[in-house]
Every structure is written in structure tokens, then in C-alpha cells.
Image (cartoon, rainbow, N blue to C red):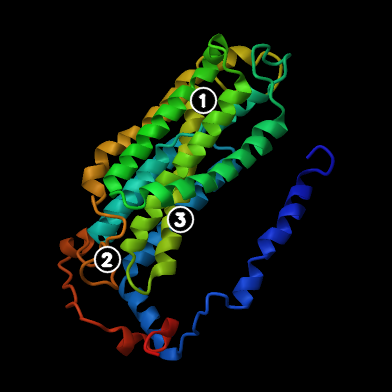
Amino acid sequence: LSYGGPRLLYLFALPFSLSVIVPTAANFMNEQPMDDHAIKVVRDRMFLQKEVLVLVGLVGASTVCLVLAGLLGVSVYASGILGVFLGLVVLAALITLFRPEIGMATAFFVIQTCMTVSIDGASFYFFTDDAKAFPDGPHFSAWFYTSGTGIIAGIFNFVGMLLYNKFAKSWRYHSLIFTANIVWCVCNACAALVYTRYNLSVGIPDRTFVITSTLLRSIVDQWLWIPAVVLMSQMCPRGMEATMFALVAGCHNLGSTVASYLGAMVIEFIGADASGVAGDGPKFQYLWAAALLQALAPMLTVALLPYLVPNASQMEPLLSSHLDSATVGSLWHRWNGVKEPEEAEDRDEEEYGTFSGIGE
């Protein structure tokens, strides 16, 4: 950044981004092309479940609205209120339009993501302000706080995956999500101590404190993210994998955006709107409270865990009937008296033809 500007970073990342073209073009996954019959079956089923298309459009429109709010300079409080409103609309749509197993679980993880309030806007200046702007600060370099801790986070994300695969893949959803939330809460609550400078009082250097909290949070992040992916894979309707995972990813991104706006509201409320200039110090007086809120907020979702997420094994399929439907038995269907189709025993070969190699 100091010598080549931000464009250099994009140029450096470009070859790695393009590398995905090689395995895709060479068909490393050994995917089979769909014949005309298979394409028609997929399209017909999708149009029979128009609620899914409505949800896709709603999530996309909500995300665009929040992005425009940021680009147009809408006030922090107005953007936060807009984010909460759109989040509630999406949650209501998920619970109403999806079949209960899918809608409830997706709603839980959206709420979980929204509760992960982000205070990065203030913490960046807390850690990187120079002695003139914040005499009592850690005075990290921008490279260490962004790239250095980012590299550490990337490495320990991988460690988190290994630990999950070794110790947690046989846990039930409730135990795993509850434990991960407890650890997340403790890690972030301890990290809040650095904003009070109490860590220096007990002899823990700022760098040690930040590195330790970064690696622990990276591990816990994986223990929260992987169960969500596994859960959705176990309840994904047959033939709709790409659509459903794209929708779940969109909901996650929407939740992250809402969390960012909520964090901005908190920062504005406590007056921690630092800008890296002299006089920033007093603005960080209550940043510890925002960090404590960040630690405790996700715990609110734990109370919803028994009602929204099944306490099943991660190896257990969660759809017992109508395996190709995302909307059967939904509140919308019940309110409108929609007659559900009878369950067919096995329609793979009849309907899909040579799609994905089925029937060969």
C-alpha cells in the first residue's frame, strides 16, 4: 500500500482468483452435462416453487438497498434502522415461505450473524492511532493490525477446521452451537479488557493480547460457520443445491451488513467516531462497553436454539419426505390451503435422466 497503492493488491490477488478457471474448464469434478429433459425438469420444479424465487429477489433487493444507503451517505441511525427493518422482513419471509425445517434453521443463522455486531470502525483507530492522536494507545502499524492479524486469522481458520474435523464433527447441533457461542463470548469479553488498558496492568503486552484473541476467534468462527453449512447440506432439497446455498450465502451477507450498521450505531452512540487525528483519545472512553456488547449479543440467539434448530447429529439427514421441495408444509401453503403433492418413492431416473450421471 505504501509503495504501489491499493491497485497493487488487486493485481497480486488476480492470478489466484483466476486459478479457479483451470479446474472448472478441465471438469475436475467429473460433472455430466444435462440433457434437455433434465433441464426442463429442474426449471419446472423451480417455477412450481415460486416462493424460492421471491426469497432470492427479496434478499438481493435488501442487500442492494443497504449498499446504496452506504454509498449515498445516509445517516448512521437511518441506515441502522433500515438494516433492522429489512432483516426482519427477510426473517419473516424465511419462516413464512420455506418449509419449517429449512426456514427456522436459516432464520436462526441470520439472527446469529446479525448479532455479531462489528465495531471495527472504531477499533482500527484505537489500535493504529499514533502517539499524537492517542497517547495511551497500542500504536500498532496499519500493516500489523490489518495484514499481520489477517494472516494469523487465515492460518487459524484452517486450524479451526482441523480441530472441528478431529473433535466436533460427531457432536449434535445444540451442543456444538452452544459451546461455540460460549467460547466466542468469553474470547470477546476478554478482548474488551484491552480497551480499558487493564491488560497492561497485569503485564500482558498489547501485541500478545491481540494475537491471542485473533487466533482464538478465528478457530471459534469455524466452529460456528461449519455447523451452519453442514445443517443446510443435510436439509437441502434434491436438485436445488446451488440455489439454496446461494440463498443461504446471501442471507449470511445480509446479516453481516446489518451487523455492521448496528455496530456503526453503537459507535456513534458512545461517541467513538475516531478519525486518526489529534484528540482521538477521549473518544475511546466507552469503547470497552461496545466490545462487551459485541461479546454478549450473540448469546441472545442461544435462547432460540431449541425452537429453531433440530438437536440432531451432524451425520443425520433432516428431510424425511418430499426431498425435492423447499416449500412443502410452509406457513404460506397452510394459510392459502395449498394441496401438497403426494410423496413419490424414487423419481431420480425417471425425471432427471442423465443429469449429474443419475440413471447411467
Residue 274 in view: no
What SS does tag 1 mark?
Answer: helix
User: Residue 104 location in percent, x, y?
Assistant: 27, 52
User: Residue 171 location in percent, x, y?
Assistant: 31, 49
Circle 3: is it few (<14), some (14-19), or many (20+) Cα within 10 Å? some
| Residue 60 circle label | none
Residue at 62%, 28% (x, y): give it: 124
Q: Nearer the viewer, mark 3 or mark 2?
A: 3
What amino acid is at disc 1? Ile
| Residue 267 circle label | 1
Residue at 72%, 58% (x, y): give it: 14
Circle 1: is it few (<14), some (14-19), or many (20+) Cα within 10 Å? many
The correct choice, above or below, for 7 with respect to 78 in the image is below
The correct choice, above or below, for 264 with respect to 241 in the image is above
Distance from the alpha carbon under mark 1 to that under mark 3: 27 Å
The answer to whether residue 197 is left or right of residue 331 is right
Quarter-wise, where is residue 81 in the image? top left
What SS does tag 2 mark?
Answer: loop
Q: Earlier in the sequence, mark 1 or mark 2?
A: 1
Distance from the alpha carbon under mark 3 to that under mark 2: 19 Å
- The residue beneath circle 2 is 327
- The residue beneath circle 3 is 249
What SS does tag 3 mark?
Answer: helix
Circle 2: is it few (<14), some (14-19), or many (20+) Cα within 10 Å? many
Distance from the alpha carbon under mark 1 to that under mark 2: 40 Å
Residue at 62%, 72% (x, y): give it: 23
The correct choice, above or below, for 156 with respect to 29 in the image is above
What amino acid is at disc 2? Thr
- Residue at the extreme right: 3
Residue at 33%, 77% (x, y): give it: 45
Q: Which of marks 1 and 3 is in front?
A: 3
